[in-house]
Each structure stands twice: as C-alpha cells, then as structure tokens.
Amino acid sequence: MYVISDLHLGAGDGRDLSHRLPIGLDFRDLSVARIMGTIDLELWRLVRWLVAHQHDLMLLGDTFDHPAAESDDRASMPTEDDCVRAFLEIAKAHWGFIFALRYFCSQPGATLRVFLGNHDIFLKMPRVWAEFLKLVAPDHPERVQLLSSLDEDGIHYQHGAIEPHDRFDPDKIIIERPGLPRLLNVSLGHLLIVSLMNPLIQVNLLLARTYNPLLVWLDAAIHFGDPDLIAILKKAGNRDK
C-alpha cells in the first residue's frame, strides 16, 4: 500500500490559495504551466511505478482543494451543483493526474482508496463522487473506495482533521431537504477565517480552513474549560436556532 496525503490540487490557474488570502502572500508560482509541468507529471510517473510493482494506492485526504477552485462567495454552504463545478474545475486543471488514476484503476486487481479530508469533503456529495468515478474508473468503479477512516493490519488510517478549527463529522456533512438541492454542511468561508485563520497562515501555511465559527469557539471553550464562555456561546447558539 502506497499512501499519499495533502496534494491540495486546486484550479491550477494561479488562484490556488492566493485568491483566498488577503494578506499579501503570493502563490502565483502555482501556475497551470508549473502545475502541469511538475505535479501531474510526477504523479503520473509514480502511478506507473505503482502499477509496475503491483502496489495499491491510498489518497489520505485533501487530494483536492475545494476552496482553491470555486470562485463564488464562500460565506454560505455550497450546494451540490457548486461542489460538482469545483471538482470538475480541478479535474480539468489536473487532467494529467486524473488520467494517471484512470490508468491505475484499469489494472486488474488494483485498489484505490480515497479518504475524505477537510478540504475535499465535497467528494461525499453523491454527484461529485459519481463524476469522480466517471473520470477515474468508468469501467471498474468497484476498484475505488471512498472512506473516512480505516483500521487494517493494526494500522489506523484517517486524514486527521480533528482539531476544533478543522474537524468535521463525515456522517453529518450533507444536508438533505425535500425538494431542495443538497447542501454541504460545512461553511467554506466566514469572518473567523479572515480575522484569525488568514493571519495564522502567515506563520503556518498548513493551517486548514474553518467551518462553523460558533461551533469552533464552543469546542475550544469546552476544551479549555471556560464556563462563562461556554454559557455565552450556548446562549448564542439557542438564539440562532
């Protein structure tokens, strides 16, 4: 089993991360020319090596980066249409990687395990996953698995988004409403990102996006045991409901 994590493939046109950070950081070296010239090529070479040596492949989350693909306002929860559009935008920019995965899944006995990460939870959307399978394993969808965690041979596999600012519940990330579009139950942008997370990204670029600000602060308050803050946040939560 060969494990890859946190590729964070985005739109590939210079917008990866840079258009989301109003703090002067310049990520425009992630241009489509550089992406296609290095990342996708190296992934293609790796997949060919995996096939030659009969290894299975595990993508351990954040393979794709939804915030680095969509162009609409991220303050609201995205619909399934938004998620499909974002995935196809990333797939178009990284057709080399998609082609490599398709080659991998065409091999007899191949197993591709795809884990949800906090940046690519849109894969949980039924139509997004259907598009992924259509591109990667149209003839053998049974060779691909979508997982949130796995225990196998004494090893626990999980993306690891478990801190208050980036955790998510894989069983509760989709809102189903009769007669209305599905919603991804994780906000991809709000004030907390601008005021707290973006400045912190200057210190550590690996910090993930946050989702619900009230839940984030409540979780942190409970974690640190502040009874006054807990009471305030719970009251705010009841009022919002």
Image (cartoon, rainbow, N blue to C red):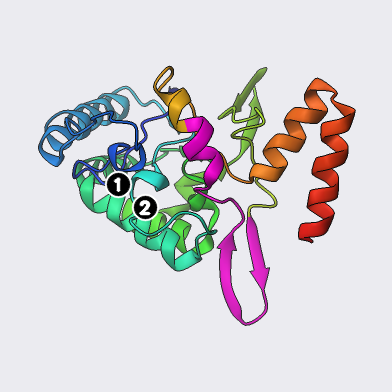
How dense is the environment of label 1, judged by Cα within 10 Å: few (below 14), some, or many (20 and up)?
many
Q: In this view, does 60 lie above or below 19?
A: above
Quadrant in the rendering for residue 36: top left
| 176 is within the stretch colored magenta | yes
Q: Check contact, mark 2 vs mark 1: CB within 8 A.
A: yes
Q: Is residue 227 visible?
A: yes
Q: Position of residue 192 (x, y in %)?
A: 56, 39
Q: In this view, does 144 lie above or below 46?
A: below
User: Callout 2, which amino acid?
Assistant: Ala
Q: Nearer the viewer, residue 45 or 209?
A: 209
Which span is picked out in magenta?
Answer: 174-197
Please indicate whether residue 28 sits to the left or right of residue 227 in the image.
left
Q: Position of residue 43 (x, y in %)?
A: 25, 30
Q: Which of 55 and 8 is in front in this view?
A: 8
Q: Which mark is residue 51?
A: none
User: Callout 1, which amino acid?
Assistant: Arg
Measure the alpha-carbon separation of dots 2 and 1. 6 Å
Q: Nearer the viewer, residue 205 or 111?
A: 205
Q: Describe the element under mark 2 as helix, strand or loop.
A: loop
Mark 1 highlights which residue? 102
Mark 2 highlights which residue? 137
Q: Can residue 169 be seen in this view?
A: no
Q: Is residue 44 above or below residue 212?
A: above
Quadrant in the rendering for residue 134: bottom left
Q: Residue at x 67, y 73 (%)?
A: 177
Q: Residue at x 30, y 49 (%)?
A: 90
Q: Where is residue 13 in the image (x, y as percent from the top left)?
A: 19, 45
Q: Nearer the viewer, residue 154 or 128?
A: 128
Q: Earlier in the sequence, mark 2 or mark 1?
A: 1
Please indicate whether residue 24 sits to the left or right of residue 173 in the image.
left
